[in-house]
């Protein structure tokens, strides 16, 4: 009912009572469950598809009863890469996702396909008229990190849930293996080569060469940590409030896949990969 609708005095009390019933959470809900029900609108577009989950293959991938393989958008989970901590965390993430979705009906938001043919989407559980955001729960419990690609409309919410789990040292955040890396320790960042990582530090300088902008975290450009941004993407970063040339002197947090070219580096292709922690 529109808030501009006219009601007579006799009906006003009745509508007030109804509104109170709608906005007060059920006493059986924990705060985390209530937050999960209230998934941000940007992460909850009109439902595009639905199905029953029949199997879970890892902490962010499951199969529906029609055979579609679903990959949860906007999060990264630990992968079994031969390292004991990673294998244990990967198994825990899978167990948590299994407990959430196996045998249950899920609704998918706007979907797309990845290069392996999997459907990538935000996913939701619907229970007795309520809605639980699966990505949000994986982040809240500390079994996932926000990915480099987050999608439109839910960046702030994803980051907030990750920050809360990190502050409480939940799940993988209890293990230093998954802690944020310091940009002024390039050796530690190099140790993450080939893996997804979050790196935080102070930007020393920003330089441009050819078609690339270099965001430097040290003066030894051949060995210190660097973030690169293609010039063609510079306008998109500026529009999102992350103008590359204004990052010098600021403390920023970068997420992405660590590569090495001399020193360790991350290629930032999307503005949400960079979070300004301290502004000038």
Image: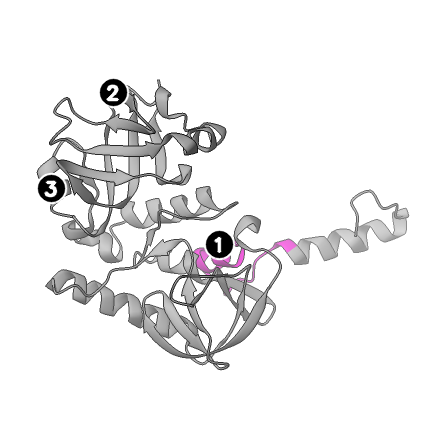
Determine crowd level at label 3: few under 14, some 14-19, many 20+ residues with C-alpha closer than 10 A: few
Determine crowd level at label 1: few under 14, some 14-19, many 20+ residues with C-alpha closer than 10 A: some
Label ID, residue 205: 2
- Residue name at image x 11 percent, y 41 percent: 188
Which corner quadrant of the image does residue 199 belong to? top left
Q: Is residue 168 visible?
A: yes
Task: Name the spot of residue 122 as percent of width and height, x first.
Answer: 48, 59
Q: Is residue 223 left or right of residue 149?
A: left
The residue carrying mark 1 is 35
Query: Which mark is nearer the camera, 1 or 3?
Result: 3
Q: Is residue 261 above or below residue 192?
A: above
**Badge 3 or badge 2: first in the primary sequence:** 3
Q: For this rendering, which residue is in front, 102 or 204? A: 204
Under circle 2, the secondary element is strand
Q: Is residue 279 visible?
A: no
The residue carrying mark 3 is 188
- Residue name at image x 47 percent, y 33 percent: 236
Q: Quadrant of the C terminus?
A: top left
Determine crowd level at label 2: few under 14, some 14-19, many 20+ residues with C-alpha closer than 10 A: some
Task: Name the spot of residue 204 as percent of width and height, x first.
Answer: 22, 21
Under circle 1, the secondary element is helix
Cα separation, mark 1 vs mark 3, equals: 35 Å
Q: Is residue 69 above or below residue 179?
A: below
> What segment is highlighted magenta in the picture?
23-39
Q: For this rendering, which residue is in front, 169 or 185? A: 185
Q: For this rendering, which residue is in front, 102 or 15? A: 102
Task: Name the spot of residue 83 as percent of width and height, x first.
Answer: 11, 62
């Amino acid at each position: 009912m529109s808030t501009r609708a006219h009601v007579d005095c006799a009906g006003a009390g009745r509508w007030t009572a109804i509104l109170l019933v709608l906005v007060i959470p059920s006493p059986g809900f924990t705060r985390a469950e209530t937050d999960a029900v209230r998934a941000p609108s940007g992460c909850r577009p009109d439902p595009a598809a639905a199905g029953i989950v029949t199997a879970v293959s890892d902490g962010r991938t499951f199969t529906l009863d029609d055979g579609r393989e679903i990959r949860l958008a906007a999060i990264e989970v630990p992968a079994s890469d031969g390292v004991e901590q990673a294998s244990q965390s990967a198994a825990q993430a899978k167990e948590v996702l299994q407990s959430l979705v196996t045998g249950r009906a899920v609704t998918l938001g706007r979907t797309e396909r990845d290069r392996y043919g999997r459907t990538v989407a935000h996913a939701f559980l619907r229970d007795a008229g309520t809605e639980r955001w699966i990505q949000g729960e994986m982040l809240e419990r500390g079994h996932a990190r926000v990915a480099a690609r987050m999608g439109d409309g839910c960046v702030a919410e994803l980051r907030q849930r990750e920050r809360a789990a990190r502050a409480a040292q939940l799940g993988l955040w209890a293990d230093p293996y998954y802690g944020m890396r310091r940009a002024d320790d390039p050796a530690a960042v190099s140790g993450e080569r080939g893996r997804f990582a979050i790196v935080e530090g102070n930007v020393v300088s920003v330089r441009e060469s050819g078609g690339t902008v270099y965001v430097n975290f040290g003066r030894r450009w051949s060995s210190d940590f660097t973030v690169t941004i293609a010039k063609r993407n510079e306008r998109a970063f500026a529009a999102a409030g992350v103008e590359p040339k204004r990052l010098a002197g600021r403390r920023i947090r970068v997420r992405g896949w660590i590569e090495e070219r001399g020193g360790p580096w991350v290629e930032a292709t999307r503005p949400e990969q960079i979070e300004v922690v301290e502004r000038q």
